[in-house]
Image (spheres, rainbow, N blue to C red):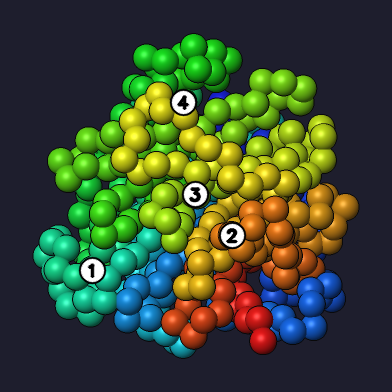
Amino acid sequence: MRLHFKKGERMFARKFGLLTLVMSLCGVVFGSVAPALAAPTVTITPVLGNLAAPRGIAFDGQGSMYLSQSGLAGAGEAGLTHTGLVSKYAFGQTTPAWSVGFNSLYATEDPSAPPDVLGPEGISAVGNGCMKQSQGQRNGCQVQMIMSESTPGILGATGGAVNDPQAGHLFRLDGASGAVTDLADVGSQQYAFTAANTDLFPSDFPDSNPYGVLVTRQGTYVADAGANTISEVMRDGTTRIIAYIPNETGVPFRDATPTCIAQGPDGFLYVGTLHFVSNLFVFGGDRSDVWRVNPNANFPDAPQLWASGLTTVTACTFDRAGNFWATEMFQGGFDATPPGDVVEIPFANPTQHTRLGFGQLPVPGGIAQGPDGAMYVTVGSSAPGASGGVMRLSVN
């Protein structure tokens, strides 16, 4: 039995058979990558390979890199495996200092299509004390990872046959040892919110699929691609919903699907959206948005539209100069071999979009600035098997 999910859960599963075809034609990541179309001042080089659906990437204040992999599809009910992974790498190293396993499962809307794997997704780090064991306390370091899906959503989709107790949970990982602390069941709380507010999206709610996480010195925030919510995770594990990212109900209809959160120079949160189906299968690309969210707001306060014209945003960050960066999973569309790019937007001018990696960053999933000033991008994020990797992008 394969899991048949609703909107948020099908974020990558929808039309995944076509995605798999595209990726097989691409020679993903470390095979026959197409020639670069980026500006000549851009240098893109491989850092890591043989990764299984790499999604989130982050650096701590010591320069160490944290990487999440959603894992491999399994056999049997919902493909539940323990192949999800979070790893820490000292800067410049290709062997992890530690790795911690997590659950994975797969989802598809089409029983004849290959599955997409869901597991560890967004990861975020803050602080420079990540070399010391902290026994679950802050002590100058926070590394947090969000799992996709929700326990009630999986139970409902499988008729109670599959229970994944990690689904939708926010975990803290000790920077020194990798020891895991369960901080909050975000997915179940967002599922309950959508069940109580089905009027927001009657065709798809209840639903939850936590995907993006941002940890700051002020707090931790999660973007739920299924519930369309941005929430703050409180110290007691409860969530406070600060924004609902609206669908666009005109023609074309666009399902927002927020996937990432970055904190801007002004202290506000900037949220990227996927807009998957309307982007690619009906109306083409350039239909994803970035929303500006007040971290001190409370639902139903409305977010503000900050930038538009992006394509299938999967991750976002601000660099140390204050520029906004986002990965565009299917920039170029399905005719591109391979699709995918990153876009840089000056904070002072959100209408100026500079794309820097087309042809060399297939189906990117995560982005973060390294201690050397370069941008590090996970690629092959929804490719089958262990065919993903990490690429380094530097602008000279």
| Residues at marks 3 and 4, CA–CA distance in whole angstroms | 23 Å
For label 4, the SS is loop
Between tags 4 and 2, which lies in front? Answer: 2
- Label 2: which residue? 348
Quarter of the image with the C terminus in it: bottom right
Which residue is located at x 76 percent, y 26 percent? 252
Residue 161 lies in what quarter of the image? top left
Image position of 91 (left or right of 166)? right
N-terminal label among 3 and 4: 4
Image position of 61 (left or right of 201)? left
- Label 1: which residue? 141
Q: Is residue 202 above or below residue 168?
A: above
Between tags 4 and 1, which lies in front? Answer: 1
| Residues at marks 4 and 1, CA–CA distance in whole angstroms | 32 Å
Q: Mark 4: which amino acid?
A: Asp
Q: Mark 1: which amino acid?
A: Cys
- Label 4: which residue? 207
